[in-house]
Amino acid sequence: MDVLEVLAEPARRRITDVLRAGEASVGDLVGALGMSQPAVSKHLRVLREAGVVSARVRAQQRIYRLEAGPFRELDAWLAPYRRLWDHHLDALERHLEEES
């Protein structure tokens, strides 16, 4: 699965939103998201397989964190589209200024 496909799932985006603030255990994520532990674990497995998150072991827990690589790739893919829209918005702004 590629990053876009993985992040198309709203629950996975919510997990990454929580992990943006820092590392978290499955229990932390369950509490923050109000999801069941099996559901969080299922989504974390998909995120881990896609390289979006990684886990380290602390005692009996796995602690999850975001990995920058997939987000950099996604950002690079989006860059030409951002430039396109910036160009269109700049043209619209110029047009509106000329109309005023």
Image: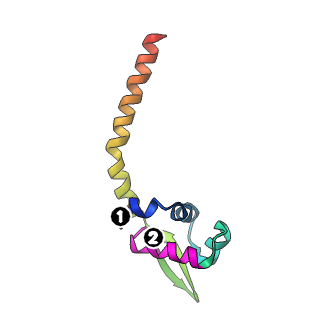
Going from the N terminus, do you reach mark 1 or mark 2 first? Answer: 1
At 67% across and 68% down in the image, what residue appears? 34
The image shows residue 85 at horizontal and vertical percentages of: 38, 35
Q: Which residue is mark 1?
A: 2
Callout count = 2
Local secondary structure at mark 2: helix
* Image quadrant assignment for residue 71: bottom left
Q: Residue furthest bottom?
A: 60
The image shows residue 87 at horizontal and vertical percentages of: 35, 31
Residue 42 among those drawn in magenta = yes
Residue 10 among those drawn in magenta = no
Q: Which residue is mark 2?
A: 47
Q: Nearer the viewer, residue 88 or 63?
A: 88
Check disc 2 and give the amino acid type.
Leu
Classify 78 as above or below 4: above
Local secondary structure at mark 1: loop
Q: Tell whether 80 sits left or right of 9.
A: left
Main structural element of the magenta stretch: helix, strand or loop?
helix
Assign the N terminus to one quadrant of the image: bottom left
**Magenta region:** 38-54
At 56% across and 61% down in the image, what residue appears? 14
The image shows residue 17 at horizontal and vertical percentages of: 56, 60
